[in-house]
Image (cartoon, rainbow, N blue to C red):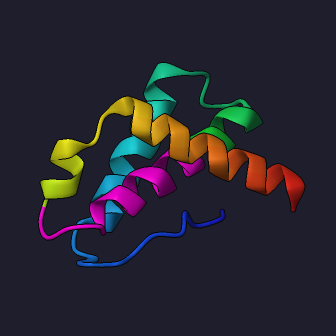
Amino acid sequence: MPAYRTTVVDATGAGDAFAGAFVATLAERDASDEHTLRLAGCRGAAAASIAIEDFGPRALERADRAEIERRSNTLLVAGALA
């Protein structure tokens, strides 16, 4: 799974953000589908990248689903090109 490049301010909560976005994607889609697993990983990485950009939950509080989708789409394209 590629990482979304960003500036790290505080890594606390990155794993929780990843897990939350990953599981939410599995809950809304067919979890047995390979594309769903890739998408879940990219959404998790995107959410984690947001979480590390500020102290505590502040960056996640400011984020919205559109930002997570934008970052995860960047990661999906990067993965396809690798």
Apparent side of residue 63 relative to residue 56 in the rendered image (left or right): right
Write the residue at 63% across / 40% down. Answer: 73
Q: Residue at x 76, y 55 (%)?
A: 78
Q: Which residues are magenta?
A: 41-56
Position of the C terminus by quadrant:
bottom right
Q: Which of the 4 image quadrants contains residue 50?
A: bottom left
Closest to the observer, 77 or 32? 77
Tally of marks? 0
Which residue occupies the extreme right position in the image?
A: 81
Q: Is residue 54 magenta?
A: yes
Q: Would you say residue 75 sits in the magenta stretch?
A: no
When the figure is inspected, residue 36 is found, relative to residue 43, above or below; the finding is: above
- Where residue 47 appears, as percent x and y from the top left, is 39, 51
Q: Main secondary structure of the magenta part?
A: helix
Counting from the top left corner in percent of width and height, residue 65 is at 37, 31
In this rendering, the answer to whether 8 lies above or below 66 is below
Q: Quadrant of residue 3?
A: bottom right
The foreground one among 51 and 25 is 51
Residue at left offset 44%, top offset 26%: 27
Q: Is residue 29 shown above or below 26?
A: above
Between residue 67 and residue 17, name the one nearer to us: 67
**Residue at x-position 20% and y-position 67%:** 54
Spot occupied by residue 11 in the image (x, y as percentages of width and height): 28, 77
Please indicate whether residue 81 sits to the left or right of residue 76 in the image: right
- Image quarter where the N terminus lies is bottom right
Q: Give the percent coordinates (x, y) of residue 18.
A: 40, 55
